[in-house]
Amino acid sequence: MSQPYESILIERRDRVAIITINRPEKRNALNIQTRAEGAAALDELSEDESVRVVIFTGAGDKAFVAGADIAEFAGRTALAQRAVMLDRGLFNAVDTFPKPVIAMVNGYCLGGGCELALACDIRIASETASFGQPEINLGIIPGGGGTQRLTRLVGEGKAMEMILTGEIINAQEAFRLGLANHVVPADQLQTKTMEVANRIAEKSPVALRLAKEAVKAASRSNLDEGLRREVDLFALCFSSEDKDEGVSAFLEKRKADFKGK
Ligand code: COA
């Protein structure tokens, strides 16, 4: 990577890049620097054609991300907080990232950590993970998309209960709600996550990008608009060499070799 980072680590495993939030002594709480570095890393990985899938995780065995860095809240004015949040944020960078992003949830996934996981496309959790939006305990509310993305994912009733009570739920409950796609024993978390990431990384990057955009349109538009968007994005696939390769490979009974063109 061209940029040195202090609060995150980046590791490549073939076509998969792993971004680790690296503040374990603060349970990987997201301070301003960490958010900025995460967004900058995504900008770099976005341009890198050798990277097809990104994984977010947290350093250590306790936390994925235990939320926004609460120490930064002390003494901050409303205007200063608004300016921080209106700046191009990490969560939106994840949401609009043109490649699939997986949250590998290895522990506490709270507040802004839960919002980071929610901005990701898939969440894979260790049995030791826990999820929650405990902002209400601080006299504030989720501000990184929690009220919107959690509600869309698990429904209004359960999102309302989690946000109003600040209740922290275990990984099995998160799985039951659809908040976690998979729950595995802690020692199998990396294997399971890499298995899913590698399976995705074999697909056409063009089709992955358009599929992500189409699925995201579902919660941002009404059915007619969403279906129309799907047709446009489906048709756009026909402009790619990957579509020719995928169809030829099927007809020739061989494995497709997608180039992302
Ligand atoms: N922001 C800033 N610092 C945090 C933090 C956060 N969100 N979460 C944890 N830390 C810090 C603690 O202040 C402590 O720092 P210190 O060693 O300098 O005192 C360190 O991380 C370890 O935390 P600790 O509470 O001792 O660890 P734990 O394993 O016993 O508990 C949590 C972990 C996540 C349950 C607990 O730290 C917690 O409740 N954190 C806040 C969660 C939250 O409200 N998030 C939403 C924020 S909007």
Image: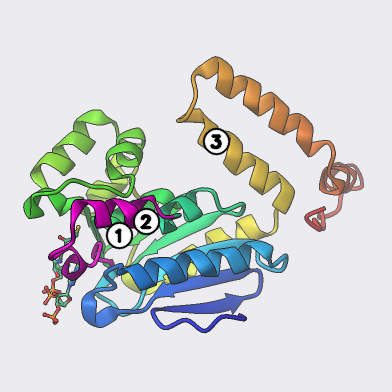
Question: Please, what is the three-letter code of the amino acid marked with disc 1?
Answer: Gly
Residue 113 circle label: 1
Specify the segment rendered in magenta. 65-87
Any atom of ligand 1 within 8 Å of the CB at mark 1?
A: yes
Q: In this view of the protein, which residue sits in the foreground, 208 or 129?
A: 208
Task: Confirm whether residue 167 shows in the render.
Answer: no
Q: What separation in Å lies between label 2 and label 1 (alpha carbons)?
A: 5 Å
Mark 2, residue position: 116
Q: Secondary structure under badge 1?
A: helix
State if disc 1 and disc 2 touch (CB < 8 Å): yes
State whether residue 150 is above or below residue 90.
above
Q: What separation in Å lies between label 3 and label 1 (alpha carbons)?
A: 22 Å
Question: Please, what is the three-letter code of the amino acid marked with disc 3?
Answer: Val
Mark 3, residue position: 215
Q: Quadrant of the N terminus?
A: bottom right
Crowding near the residue tagged with mark 3, few <14, some 14–19, many ≥20 C-alpha atoms within 10 Å: some
Q: Quadrant of ligand 1?
A: bottom left
Mark 3 or mark 2: name the one nearer the start of the chain. Answer: 2
State whether residue 190 is above or below residue 131.
below
Task: Confirm whether residue 137 shows in the render.
Answer: yes
Q: In this view of the protein, which residue sits in the foreground, 4 or 162?
A: 4
